[in-house]
Image: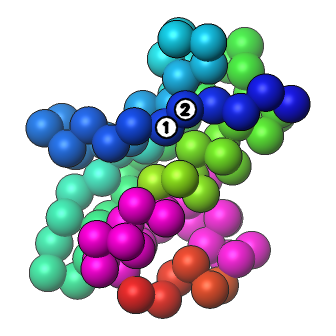
Amino acid sequence: MPEITTVHDDVHSRYLASLDGEVIGEAVYRDTEDGRIFTHSEINPAFEHQGYGTQMVRAALDDTRSAGLKPIGQCSMVRNFLAEHPDYARR
């Protein structure tokens, strides 16, 4: 499976996932005093069920933890990832 590139677009409070230069997904968040709350995430339907969502979420959560913030999954994609990888739920 090809690797995607995930970049932090802090101006718009989101992470963008790209494959071969095409944006195929995003993870939208809002920062609060409790942590970084991921409110919405999606992968373009043409690229679903290929592991790209997991790659995007992992990159977003790695960046969130590097910033010293606690990730909070309000959307199902991030919430499910955190349930499967409890180490990511810690600050």
Q: Which residue is mark 1?
A: 6
Q: Which residue is mark 2?
A: 5
| Residue 77 percent coordinates (x, y) | 60, 53
| Residue 20 percent coordinates (x, y) | 61, 12
Residue 75 in sight in this render: no
Q: Is residue 53 above or below residue 82?
A: above
Would you call the spot at circle 2 few (<14 residues within 10 Å), some (14-19), or many (20 or more)? some
What amino acid does circle 1 point to? Thr
**Could you tell me if the residues under marks 2 and 1 are in contact, i.e. CB atoms within 8 Å?**
yes
User: Alpha-carbon distance for marks 2 and 1?
Assistant: 4 Å
The quadrant where residue 72 appears: bottom left
What amino acid does circle 2 point to? Thr
The magenta segment = 61-85
Residue occupying image coordinates x 62% and y 86%:
87
**Nearer to me, 2 or 36:** 2
Tell me the element at label 2.
Answer: strand
Asked whether 43 falls inside the magenta stretch, the response is no
The label number, if any, that marks residue 49 in the structure image: none
Asked whether 75 falls inside the magenta stretch, the response is yes
Q: Is residue 24 above or below residue 67?
A: above
Q: Is residue 4 left or right of residue 2?
A: left
Residue occupying image coordinates x 59% and y 57%:
58
Would you call the spot at circle 1 few (<14 residues within 10 Å), some (14-19), or many (20 or more)? many
Q: Is residue 75 left or right of residue 85?
A: left
| Residue 11 percent coordinates (x, y) | 13, 38
